Every structure is written in C-alpha cells, then in structure tokens.
C-alpha cells in the first residue's frame, strides 16, 4: 500500500494546494495532509483552524485524511507509516529549496521517497502569502480559495479590525 504525506502550513489552504492534494490522492492509496505546527512562525490561523479548513475542502476525497504535526516531516512520515513525501512546486525558487530538503530527508530517511508535483499552470503564481496580502485590502480572493476558506479569512480580518 502506498501511503503519502503532503505536508505544509496551509495558512490558508488555496486552490493550488487543493490541486496538488487531488492529484496526489490519485497517486497513492492513502494521502495524509500534514498540517505543520511551527512554533517559529505566527500563522494567521491556528493549527486546529487549518485542519478544519482542510477537512472541509477535502471531504469529497475518501482516501485523504488531515493530521497536524510538529518536528521533522520524515519523523511524521515514519510515525504514519508513509513511504512517499509529496511536495508541490510552483517555480524555480521552490525547486531549489525543495531539492535541498529532499536530499536532506533522503539522508535522514532513505526509505521515504520524495515526489515533486508541478502545480497546475493556472495556480503557479498563487501562495498563501498572496491570498493574505490581497485579503488584507478587502479585495476579491474568490479565485484563490474556496468560499468556505474565504469566509474564514474574512472573519479573521474583521476580528482584527475590531481589535484596532
């Protein structure tokens, strides 16, 4: 059985992420979307909120589960008995970073293969950072994220404005 991990921060999940999730789910028997809890970053959404959004947008994919983790991705993959790490690529800078990580992971965990999927061309420009930046100006983000995620983003920004 091929079990894959697609790790990331997903802060927030975008159509680009969903594209990679759908395509990855077709390549493995089971796909675990791993939501990274990184204490070194201050995300817009909590780990629990990111997990909830991912569960909502992947509910039609029966072989996809969502789990959070912290620490090394290869340790999480071992814990989940996964043998494939899936990484999405948008452009050359992504490749340089991801190649370095894949090589490091291979040294640490040679039994786990890294597979790179190019993001579909129509999402190659899209990042969570772009979504948050555009949303911060109250601009239309409906082409970047599903309606459920857009609603969560709008609520976050309205709460932020109430505090100020």
Image (cartoon, rainbow, N blue to C red):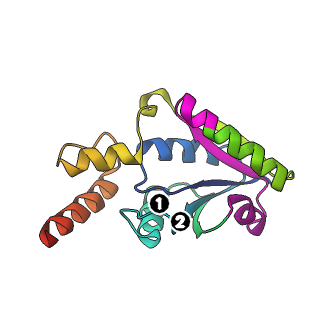
For the point 48% across and 66% down, which residue is it? 51
The one of 152 and 156 positioned closer to us in this rendering: 156
Question: Does residue 118 appear to the left or right of 143 in the view shown?
Answer: right
Q: Residues within 10 Å of mark 1 (few under 14, many from 20)?
A: many
Q: Earlier in the sequence, mark 1 or mark 2?
A: 2
Which element is circle 1 on? helix
Above-or-below relation of 102 to 164: above
> Which quadrant of the view contains residue 31?
bottom right
Which residue is situated farthest in the right direction here?
Answer: 111
Give how far across and how far down residue 66 sits, in percent.
56, 64
> What is the spatial separation of the Cα atoms under label 1 and label 2, in whole angstroms?
17 Å
Give how far across and how far down residue 30 sits, in percent.
69, 57
**Is residue 44 covered in magenta?**
no
> Which quadrant of the view contains residue 139?
top left
Residue at the disc numbered 1: 54
Give how far across and how far down residue 1 sits, in percent.
81, 55
Question: Does residue 79 appear to the left or right of 132 in the view shown?
Answer: right
* Tag of residue 124: none
Give how far across and how far down residue 24 sits, in percent.
63, 45
For the point 59% across and 63% down, which residue is it? 65
Residue at the disc numbered 2: 38
Which element is circle 2 on? loop
> Which quadrant of the view contains residue 158?
bottom left
Question: Does residue 136 appear to the left or right of 107 in the view shown?
Answer: left
Above-or-below relation of 55 to 141: below
- Quadrant showing the C terminus: bottom left
**Is residue 78 covered in magenta?**
yes
Q: Residues within 10 Å of mark 2 (few under 14, many from 20)?
A: few
Residue numbers of the magenta segment: 72-96
For the point 55% across and 42% down, which residue is it? 20
């Amino acid at each position: 059985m091929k079990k894959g991990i697609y790790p990331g921060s997903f802060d927030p999940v975008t159509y680009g992420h969903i594209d990679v999730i759908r395509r990855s789910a077709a390549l493995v028997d089971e796909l675990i979307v791993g939501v990274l809890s990184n204490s070194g970053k201050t995300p817009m959404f909590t780990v629990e909120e990111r997990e909830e959004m991912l569960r909502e947008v992947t509910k039609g994919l029966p072989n996809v589960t969502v789990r959070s983790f912290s620490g090394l991705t290869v340790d999480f993959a071992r814990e989940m008995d996964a043998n494939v790490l899936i990484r999405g690529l948008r452009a050359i800078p992504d490749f340089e970073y991801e190649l370095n990580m894949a090589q490091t992971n291979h040294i640490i965990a040679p039994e786990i293969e890294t597979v790179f999927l190019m993001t579909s061309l129509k999402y190659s420009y899209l990042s969570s950072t772009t979504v948050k930046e555009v949303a911060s100006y109250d601009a239309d983000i409906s082409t970047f994220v599903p309606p459920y995620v857009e609603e969560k983003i709008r609520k976050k920004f309205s709460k932020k404005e109430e505090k100020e």
